[in-house]
Amino acid sequence: MEEEVKGTFKLADLGSLLLNSFKAVLKGEFLLRLNASRYFIHIVYAFVLMAGIIWISLKIDDTTARVEQNKAVLEDLEIVCKQREFELVECCRRSTVEKNLIKMGSELRDRETPLTVMKK
Amino acid sequence: MDAAGGNKKKRDRIGIVLYATYLCLLLASVLVVGRLIQIQVAFTPNPRIERVLTPSVTSTTIEARRGNIYDCEGRLLAISRPVYTLHMDCTVQKDRYASMSNGKELEQAWLAKAKELSAALAKEFPGKTADQYYRQISEGRRKGQKFLSICSGVDYNTYTRVMSFPLFNEGRFKGGVRVDKEYTRGYPYGDLARRTIGFVRSKNSTVGNTHVGIEGKFDETLKGKDGIEWLRVTDYGMAHNNDSIYVDASDGKDIRTTINIDYQDIADKALREQIETDDEIEGGCVILMEVGTGAIKAMVNLLRDPKTGKLEESQNLAVGRLGEPGSVFKITTLMTALEDSIVTSLDDVIPGNNGRIEGYRYETDQHILDYQREHHTKQIPIIYGVKISSNYVFRYLAIKNYENRPKEFLANLQKYKLTEAYDFDVDGMPRPSLPNPDSRYWHKSDLGQVAMGYSVTETPLHIITFYNAIANKGKMMKPYLVDGPQILNERICSKATADTLTRGLKAVTEDGTASRLRTAKVQVAGKTGTSRVVLDNGRYESADGRKKNQGTFVGFFPADDPQYSVITVVYSKLSYRNFYGSQYPAGTVKTIVDKLHDVDPHWRSTIGKTAQK
């Protein structure tokens, strides 16, 4: 019978619960009243985790920004590579090589007989 | 009790301090929470401040890399690379200097650097003098000009040089330089195979034909698909925004063509050597094809620019230009006659008839009269007709045997694939035309005209495909630049017919119209052809007696073991002179054959153990 009375919820209980909680907060006893002192290490751990998350998200920002900067550097290097490749291929044109040889005064000319391949 | 009282007093003081601190922190946290709620629910920030402080998120396009084009040996033919356009904001720092106490000195120093910049620009781009550059910059500064064009379309090397010039090396906010980068297509071999490799014009181009050559035909494969990325501003710079969608770019695929750029260079040079100095030549084309596969190893298209007079790759004549082929078409007549057993051997003879066909108003064939006179005979061997390219012999063969059944004669041309525009790796192949016996425009003389390559129009690609089939013993391969080998017609003629035709074509280069090729390093079998081009007046001659010629040589080599077939067509301008297939075209082919003999692996010899096996 007593248990039934205890389990009955009244609006006045909520009021007294809030009032008691407020008083406990003012007195700095809220967590102690909840008997949370044994979870103190967990609470500290949760704070550390939160701080960690903030720190990591800042580091992620830093890293992604560096990724973008490196992308730009890579793009520049790719452009240089393409330009070099382009110039190299330009120089390799058969008639360009012939012209350059003549310009340089070389007596080397295109062969006038087919190659002979020597095999071991 | 005292001690207890003292302890209690001490505890109270610490307790009060701690309690006061706690209350302060509690109050602060209540304020913070309250403010947070207020900001979330009721706060309306100043829009200007909000705009400045809110990290902006911008969408950027991740450009897909356009695929490269390579030749058959993996050498680069086309690549995407950036070109730069540089502008200058002449007013940079001007207002700031004006508000400073030493502004005049700073302004003078800026202008002095602008003078140095002008001198450097004049050296790099000789189109303007240093004074002209300086005047533009200084006047632009005075007038408040924020956009002065410096250069456009310059490559990376030039860009880096220009960026090292005085003032420009101070960057955008001090030097005023603004750079636009745009990726364009680069062709390291310049004009070589330019029309075959092709290009894609911008969508805004006023020219209708925006997709040209391999670039145009395979644009979808080459271009890939652009992606999207959202970037946000962070304290460290722009960073990828993980909360937004990200679509990665799908790069375009590379394409490997059948072109051998060395052979292209050889063919290009050979044709230029022949026609470059003759201003009466409009242009010409060369196709070099691998006999067994139909792979095109070189395709040269040179057309003289009317203004500059230079030969340029501005039109694909080889694929797109129709013309009456002339005598090179006579071999189709001979093939038909051989296949239908009208001619069994090239040693067969036909009556000479003094070079005339009874009932027809064709001109007399002078060669036949000469032969009859020299050999005291009225019989003409077919092989002689092939060697000297007699109009009479081929007209005779067609008219005497197909006069009453011209459709059967023309049906063979369909079998030889000389009547259709088949799918090719470069767009722009027109459909050949030939007269229709059912048409009211058909005249009985048309049959004889077709037999010798008139009244019918073909592209150089159609003609070489036909000759390539002869070299390939009757198997007609589809010409290709990118996709693999395909058969157009498994057998256009028997092996015996192909051998007989090869014998005739060898005779042409041994002591016939193409005797210029007799001294080639490799024996060539081929045929010359010269035709006149129909002018705007509908005739072959202008009112003042000038004409345009189309000279052709087509053949294959080595004659007994064909590896390559080749065609050269040269087009003349309106001229009083005659241009024959035995001249420039045969000369071009001789140079190509001689060069290929020296460089192509087919002619290499091997010594050593492997060779002995």
Image (cartoon, helix red, strand yellow):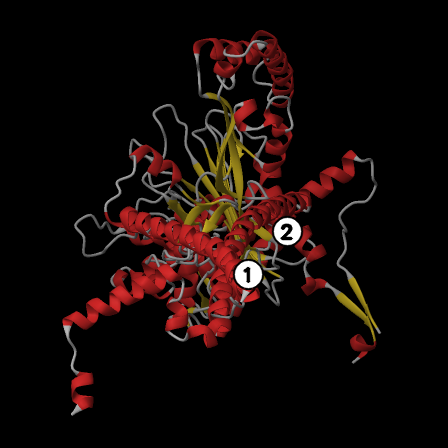
Residue B262 numbered mark, or none: 2
Q: Position of residue B89 (x, y in %)?
A: 48, 21
Left or right of B600? Residue B506 is left
> What is the crowding at mark 1: few (fewer than 14 residues within 10 Å), some, or many (at least 20)?
few
Query: Is residue B610 or residue B63 the one in the foreground?
Result: B63
Which residue of the protein is positioned furthest toward the bottom in this rendering?
A: A1
Residue B332 visible to the viewer: yes
Identify residue type, mark 1.
Gly
Picture layout, residue B139 above or below residue B409: above
Picture layout, residue B296 above or below residue B455: below
Q: Chain of mark 1?
A: B
What is the CA distance from the residue labelled 1 to the residue labelled 2?
Answer: 107 Å
Corner quadrant of residue B54: top left
Identify residue type, mark 2.
Asp
Residue B6 numbered mark, or none: 1
Q: Considering the numbered disc 1 on the image, is that residue within a helix, a strand or a loop?
A: helix
Query: Is residue B165 or residue B110 the one in the foreground?
Result: B110
- Which one is in front in this view, the residue at disc 1 or the one at disc 2? 1
